Image (cartoon, rainbow, N blue to C red):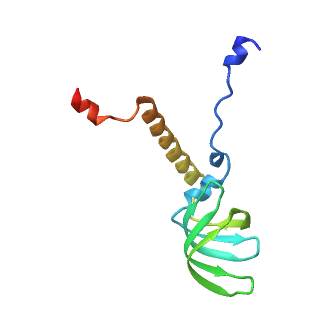
Amino acid sequence: PTSSERTSRAPPMPPRNEKSLVCFIQALVGTTVVIECRDDVAVRGQLEFCDDDMHCTLTSAIRVTPGGEKTKLDRIFIRARMIRYVHFAPSIDPSALIETKRQEWFEGSRHYAKAAAFGPKNEAKAILD
């Protein structure tokens, strides 16, 4: 390889959650959603947490079986592989929510890069000088 081929690098890849719609589900945290599972069970509740693999935690949930049996739950964890659909309120604008979440990540990464470039503030050293 020539020197120009060795110095050229591919642009950095965006985080995995930014390349999928998991960022949208993560942006729904705090809203009421209905998660339809692969075993035909539906769970309605407040989305408390969603990780990068799309495992979800709901609070104040109601679990409804295919037979119509309802169960109230304080908290429920749903594995990503069990999720078939995630339903949300029609008043939510998906594109705006995704863009807001991406902007939060961008600001967070910028803050981290700035702290890494300049290092942490050392107040003890400043006092001694």
Q: Residue at x 71, y 77 (%)?
A: 41
Q: Is residue 74 left or right of residue 6?
A: left
Residue 39 point in image, percent of width and height: 76, 74
Q: Tell which of 26 and 90 is nearer to you.
A: 26
Residue 17 point in image, percent of width and height: 63, 49
Residue 103 vertical position relative to residue 32 in the rendered view, above or below: above
Residue 49, image quadrant: bottom right
Q: Residue at x 75, y 76 (%)?
A: 40
| Quadrant position of the C terminus in the picture | top left
Residue 67 vertical position relative to residue 88 in the rendered view, above or below: below
> Number of labelled discs?
0
Residue 78, image quadrant: bottom right
Q: Tell which of 53 and 123 is nearer to you.
A: 123
Q: Tell which of 114 and 123 is nearer to you.
A: 123
| Quadrant position of the N terminus in the picture | top right
Residue 58 point in image, percent of width and height: 57, 70
Q: Residue at x 67, y 24 (%)?
A: 9
Residue 108 point in image, percent of width and height: 48, 43
Any part of residue 5 in sight? yes
Any part of residue 89 in sight? no
Residue 74 vertical position relative to residue 11 in the rendered view, above or below: below
Work out which residue is located at the far top of the displayed protein and give it: 2
Residue 106 vertical position relative to residue 72 in the rendered view, above or below: above
Q: Residue at x 46, y 33 (%)?
A: 116
